[in-house]
Image (cartoon, rainbow, N blue to C red):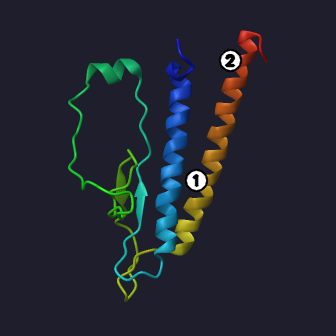
């Protein structure tokens, strides 16, 4: 069994990737705090199902249509990033007269919380690898 097939490590790696993608989205929100008519976005957290529950009710994968980038220099459209995670828009926001709906204080709190979550998951991942090395007698 490959180390990448261990479920806990796979879930932790997915969570790390989600935190990185969320950090990118939150940074876009902060960067566009003064952009007229900009609406803040966020990512929905990944849902980890038990393996038995996932295979019992598995539906056909959802396919989406997206723009094709033919050159690396082309700009990615909003919401068209390389992230496999779903984006959501919050309905509870205040809109300024310019039409911007970014609340900087809330976004910075989310950035700090996301950073703490990332550090906690990274520590769990590192300790899990350490336990595996100890079990193999190499630690």
Residue contact at pointers 2 and 1, CB within 8 angstroms: no
Q: Residue at x 41, y 23 (%)?
A: 50
What secondary structure is found at the residue carrying circle 1? Answer: helix
Residue 71 rendering spot, x and y as whole percentages: 33, 57
- Find residue 63 and report its image quarter: top left
Q: How many marks?
A: 2
Residue named by callout 2: 132
Task: Mark 1: give few (<14), some (14-19) or many (20+) Cα within 10 Å.
Answer: some
- Find residue 77 and report its image quarter: bottom left
Q: Identify which residue, 108 or 94, lies in the foreground.
A: 108
Q: Identify which residue, 95 or 37, lies in the foreground.
A: 37
Residue named by callout 1: 114
Q: Residue at x 48, y 51 (%)?
A: 21
Q: Identify which residue, 108 or 63, lies in the foreground.
A: 63
Residue 118 rendering spot, x and y as whole percentages: 61, 46
Residue 69 rendering spot, x and y as whole percentages: 30, 56
């Amino acid at each position: 069994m490959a180390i990448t097939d261990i479920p806990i490590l796979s879930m932790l790696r997915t969570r790390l990737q989600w935190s990185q993608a969320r950090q990118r989205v939150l940074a876009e929100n902060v960067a566009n705090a003064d952009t007229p008519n900009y609406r803040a976005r966020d990512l929905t957290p990944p849902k980890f199902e038990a393996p038995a529950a996932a295979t019992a009710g598995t539906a056909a994968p959802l396919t989406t249509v997206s723009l094709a980038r033919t050159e690396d220099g082309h700009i990615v459209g909003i919401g068209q990033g390389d992230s496999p995670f779903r984006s959501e828009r919050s309905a509870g926001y205040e809109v300024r007269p310019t039409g911007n709906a970014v609340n900087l204080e809330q976004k910075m709190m989310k950035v700090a919380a996301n950073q703490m979550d990332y550090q906690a998951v990274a520590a769990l991942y590192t300790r899990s690898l350490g336990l595996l090395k100890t079990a193999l007698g190499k630690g």
